[in-house]
Amino acid sequence: MENKIKITYETQLEKLEWYKKKWTEDIDILSLKNDVGWTIAHAQARRGWKTKDSAILKWATKQGYTVAHVQAFKWGEMADLDDEILDIKTSMPWLPQGKKLIMQPVTVRQMKNTGS
């Protein structure tokens, strides 16, 4: 009897941590998410992975923080993004740690200027 490991958000995130920058492009794995909506695509983007796939860039957490927001904040990656994606706002007010800004929903375009 074959012992299959169930692929979950947690097991894939652990694998991502273990292999460091060994990205997947498998849409079924990229779309795995935790209870707040953070996907493997968000986690990979946080660690340097980039995509231009507009559907993936629009995936959002419950607070409206998209994969595009992650790319823009962490890496300033905005090349070739259309206005529809650049104008996506978080649904909850957001304030980067240590920044002196007013708490407000933030667009992807604004995220680039507040990032690291």
Image: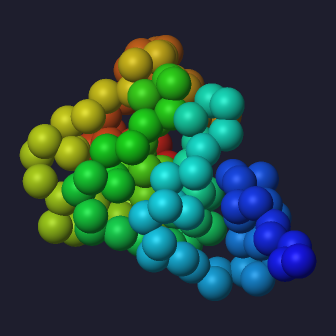
Left or right of residue 51: residue 13:
right
Residue at x 47%, y 17% (from the top left corner): 92
**Res. 7 visible in picture:** yes
Q: From the viewer's side, name the closer residue of 2 and 89.
A: 2
Quarter the C terminus occupies: bottom right
Q: From the viewer's side, name the closer residue of 105 and 38.
A: 38
Residue 34: quarter of image: top right
Left or right of residue 73: residue 107:
left
Q: Is residue 64 above or below residue 44?
A: above
Residue at x 64%, y 81% (from the top left corner): 21
Quarter the N terminus occupies: bottom right
Residue at x 54%, y 77% (from the top left corner): 24
Query: In the rendering, at what x and y percent does residue 113 appear?
Result: 38, 47
Q: From the viewer's side, name the closer residue of 111 and 18.
A: 18
Query: In the rendering, at what x and y percent does residue 35 appear?
Result: 67, 31
Residue at x 16%, y 67% (from the top left corner): 80
Query: In the rendering, at what x and y percent does residue 40 appear?
Result: 59, 57
Left or right of residue 17: residue 33:
left
- The figure's colour scheme reads rainbow
Query: In the rendering, at what x and y percent does residue 96 appear?
Result: 58, 34
